Image (cartoon, rainbow, N blue to C red):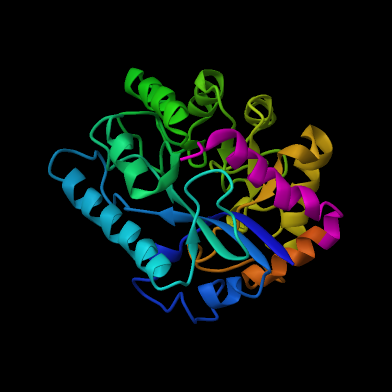
Amino acid sequence: MRLADLHEDLAYASMRMDVINGSAQSSISMLRSFDYAFVFAAVFPRAGARGVGKTVRPALMGLLLEQVRFYLELERAGLVNIVRRRGDLRPGVNLLLSLEGADALGDAGDLLLLRELGVRAIGITWNEDNRFASSCMARRDYGLTSEGEELVKLANELGIILDVAHASKRTVLDVASASKKPVIASHANAAALKGHRRNLDDEEIEAIVRTGGVIGVTAIRETLPSPTIQGIVDNLKYIGEGFGWSHVAVGTDMLGIDETPNGFEDVLRVSELAEATGHGDELWGNPLRVVSESLGDR
C-alpha cells in the first residue's frame, strides 16, 4: 500500500500533540503502515498578525528553523527519509519539506538558505498578503509582485516546487504563467463544487494543468460540497474527469485541520479514495512525476 500526500502539518502539530506515535489524524507511526509513504511535510511559521514587518519577520524565521530542525531530528533518529533530490524515495516514510507561506522571507534570495536546509517546496502565500503576492483572503487581488516574479524564477532554478494553495486567483494565474516547472496547489478543492475562498475555479485549475502540475484535493470540511469522504471523492472525480487524471493528487491537510470529514478520520483512509476512484496509480504517481521534473540531482 502506497501513500502520496501533498500536505500534512506534522511539525506544527508537534507543538501540541504526539505526532510520532499518536493516533490523531496522522503520525509517523501511522505513516509506517504504508510500504511507501511520501508526504509534503509543512513548515508553517504562522504569521498571526497582519502586515509582516521587520519586527515580526525574525520571529517567523525562528519558527521556521525550529520546525525544520524537528524534521531533521526525525531523520537523524532514523524515523523518516527526507527527500532532497530525484531518486531519494525509499521504502518507509519519506518527507519533502514544504514551506507554507513566504512571509518569513526577507527577499527571494532567502531561497538559497532554505534549499540548504532541505526545503524543496514553497507556498507563495498563506492567508495573508505578503511582499511576493496576494493571498486568497486579499481585499485587492494584485497577484504576483516583481519580487514574487524573482521568487518564481529562483525557485525554478533551485529545483524548489511552487505551491499556490492559499493564493489569490491572480496570483495562481501569474505563477502558472511565469513558472517553467510544474506548479502545484498542495491542498485545495474545486470552486465549482463549493464556493470558498480557498478553492480553485476552472480557470485556475486549467492554468495549473498547463504547467504539468497537480492539485491536491483536501479534507478541509468547509471546502467540500459535503463534509464527508464522498465530498473528497467528488472533488477527485471533478478534476480527474474534467481536466485529466494526470493532474490529480491528495493533499489531506491532516494535523492542520480541527475536524476531519465524516468517514475520513485519519490518513489511513486515503486507500479508500484510491478504491473509490479507481485511480490509485495516478494519486501516487502524479506527485512523483512533479518531483522528478522539478528537483535536481544533488
- Report the magenta stretch's main SS: helix
x, y percent for residue 33: 65, 75
- Find residue 133 and report its image quarter: top left
x, y percent for residue 115: 36, 41
Residue depicted at 81% across the width and 46% down the height? 237
Residue depicted at 46% across the width and 40% down the height? 298
- Find residue 254 and report its image quarter: bottom right
Span shown in magenta: 275-298
Q: Nearer the viewer, residue 270 or 189?
A: 270
Q: Height in image: 274 above or below 55?
A: below
x, y percent for residue 213: 64, 34
60 within the magenta span = no
Q: Height in image: 26 above or below 118?
A: below
| Residue 194 visible in the displayed image | no
292 within the magenta span = yes
Farthest residue in the right direction?
Answer: 278
Name the side, left or right, on which 74 lies relative to 83.
left
